Image: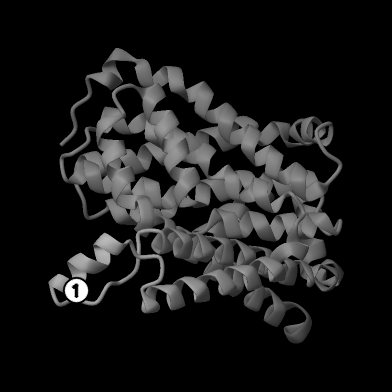
Amino acid sequence: MLNSIVVPMVLGFMIFMLGLKAMELTLHRSVGHHLQTVLEQMTATPLHGLLIGTATTAVLQSSTAVTVMTIGLVNAGLLTFPRTLGIILGTNIGTCLTTELIGLNISKLGWPLLLISLGCWFVTVLAGELGLGTLRRTKLSFSQAGLRPSGSRFWPPVRSTSVVVGGFALLLIGMALMQSVAPAVEASSFFSAFLGRAEGSVIWGIAAGAVLTAAVHSGAAVIAIIMGLAAVSAMPVPIGIAIVLGANIGTCVTALLVSYSGSKAGRFVAWSHVVLNVGGAVLFAPFTRELQAVVAMMTTSPAAQIAHAQTIFNIACSLLALPLCYLPKLRRMKVQ
């Protein structure tokens, strides 16, 4: 069991998380400061907030990062609590991009994409060191100041893009490695016992998703594992959907921990995230099989069905909750 399940699973998970964090940190470093300004200036209405929250989460590849950024802005007094409600709704929609990309079943492209990204990164580093591509006027200004040119403005974006592509390639490689343990997992008695209980009660699936996501602080990683198991028919899609519902609840833990030492308004933001995800899970829990029937009409791939189910769930929950954000009592709410 150690060699057939634990080692490949842990190694695949580490590679997956490395890729996810590489994408998140690179994108945050490249455009994060611009997104903070956008969050401050373009959240006048809940609908605007939802659109901005969706876009920023899709760009940063992390709903947790956007939620934590939002809590920080509220704690700093740059955003009021009512202006954050739409952002929170949007983060749940934007986070679906990662799983939808994984659901395309392109894991075979992992190694080629990684090699291409490493090649591009090496070229940009070499070009930067040699000063290639630097505008002549820039060279002159540096030489007049007695400084060495660092390269043109062209190379940093290319370098960042190569890191993002490499991070996505690591996602695919880690996903394939975690998927390779599916036959051994399916044969284990513990997994069989879990499936038996989960088929009898959806609560088991939701609880498993919430606990696993809270433990690893990444809903995308947990959902990717479930998609891998579903792809080889080791995990029934309805149970996978239940785990997805729980994973959305588990993503709230990081925001709650961050908000604990902040202002009361920051804690309100975190708890509004909890209310949205728990309320959505409770609402959809009795209809996991119906949701599976809907996504089955969209695709025959079990992994893609789970990705589509997450997208439908998050969009439906956010749109159902959006009118509540326009209630006058919430719009006038002032929390310090």
What residue is shown at x 45% (from left), y 62% (from top)?
160
Residue 216 seen by the camera: no
Q: Quadrant of residue 186?
A: bottom right
Whole-percent x, y for residue 4 in the image: 78, 81
Q: Secondary structure at mark 1?
A: helix
Whole-percent x, y for residue 121 in the image: 51, 71
Q: Is residue 194 above or below residue 298?
A: below
Q: Disc 1 designates what residue?
A: 143
The colour scheme is: one colour
Along the line of sight, the residue nearer the viewer: 118 or 41? 118
Asked whether, in this view, residue 332 is left or right of residue 319, the answer is left
Name the residue type under label 1.
Ser
Asked whether, in this view, residue 213 is left or right of residue 263, the answer is right
The C terminus lies in which quarter of the figure? top left
What residue is shown at x 38% (from left), y 35% (from top)?
87
Whole-percent x, y for residue 229 in the image: 78, 60
Q: Residues within 10 Å of mark 1 (few under 14, many from 20)?
A: few
What residue is shown at x 26% (from left), y 68% (from top)?
139
What residue is shown at x 81% (from left), y 67% (from top)?
182
Residue 167 seen by the camera: yes
Residue extending furthest left?
A: 145
Q: Is residue 187 above or below residue 276?
A: below
The N terminus lies in which quarter of the figure? bottom right
Along the line of sight, the residue nearer the viewer: 237 or 14? 14
Residue extending furthest bottom?
A: 3
Asked whether, in this view, residue 103 is left or right of residue 271, the answer is right
